[in-house]
Amino acid sequence: MLTPFTESGSVDLDGLDSLTEWYINCGVSGLFSVCLSSEMYDLTDEERIAIAKRVVDRTAGRVPVFASGTFGGDTEAQGASIVRMSETGVDGVVVIVSQMAHDGEDESVWRLNVEQMLTRTGDVRLGLYECPRPYHRLLTTETLGWSAETGRFDFTKDTSCREDDIVGKIQESRGTSLQFYDACAATLWTTLENGGDGFCGISGNFYADLYVWLCEHFDKEPETARRLHRFLSVAERAIGVDYPVSAKLFLSRSGLPIRSDCRAKSATFDERDLRILRDLEGMVAEWRERVGSSLARGWQ
């Protein structure tokens, strides 16, 4: 999820309500609040908690809500942070993979730290996120399987963009509660074909409804789904420029009452940038008409 801000720079809770409704109207099966797209490292602890609670309250059980809960410190501090986030009512607290061991420390250190964290967090349901900050740590297939076997993890957001790794990780998580979500549009077809559970990436903040359709129809209408996947894969390269400003601007132009202001990044869109954005809007509208999206006639 994105985090909308007011003109003065504070969190726009009314805008967050509208954004939450937009995701649900797109048909998403869950929400990941307080993530990198949410500008989580540019939020205070109090703001992270307030955002997660607001999303939980607005969602009112319609879809599960997850939120990140590890932002540095020893395992005691991380465990306390997870428990505090769980008290907002989220369905799961996401463990940022690179926060559980320093860069250069091996998998045995990571597992030991996670084991200690698990003992400090009771029965809180958890997720995993291979967030590229503070550094990009990817879980090995074996370590993901180990995590799944603990029985505590319900969600993983994979950012490897490597087909062999993806297939192996999906196989390792079978028969457990761990659901596998791909952050990369280019490898999403491989994820779905091999039994993965869906998509959780930045381009979902532009047209989540198209990803919902693809995940639900890739094996029912394979020809159309293949063409849609090719479009999503190519478009993802374009929308990454000046993200997340670009995502907020895209949504505000569609009628969502949020501003494009960000804390993590500032950007000015010139006429060329806006032309590309308009072309993307047109292509998205065509695909929405083609697959019968509920957003084919815009945000209401």
Image (cartoon, grey):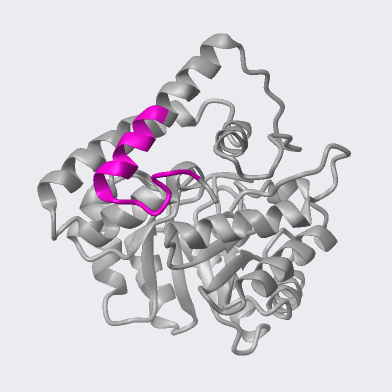
- Horizontally, residue 234 falls left or right of residue 25, namely left
Label total for image:
0
Q: For the magenta stretch, what is the residue range?
A: 282-298
Q: Nearer the viewer, residue 258 or 49?
A: 258
Examine the image and state in which quarter residue 48 appears: bottom right
Q: Residue at x 52, y 74 (%)?
A: 64
Q: Position of residue 144 (x, y in %)?
A: 39, 67
Q: Is residue 132 above or below residue 117?
A: above
Q: Residue at x 30, y 55 (%)?
A: 213
Q: Nearer the viewer, residue 248 or 144?
A: 248
Q: Is residue 93 above or below residue 212?
A: below
- Horizontally, residue 217 falls left or right of residue 62, namely left
Q: Is residue 211 magenta?
A: no
The furthest residue to the top: 271
Q: Nearer the viewer, residue 67 or 215?
A: 215
Q: Residue at x 73, y 67 (%)?
A: 54
Q: Position of residue 187 (x, y in %)?
A: 28, 45
Q: Residue at x 72, y 48 (%)?
A: 41
Residue 15 seen: yes
Q: Position of residue 134 (x, y in %)?
A: 64, 46
Residue 101 seen: no
- Horizontally, residue 149 falls left or right of residue 106, namely left
The furthest residue to the bottom: 123
The furthest residue to the right: 8
Q: Position of residue 184 (x, y in %)?
A: 37, 45
Q: Is residue 265 above or below residue 139?
A: above
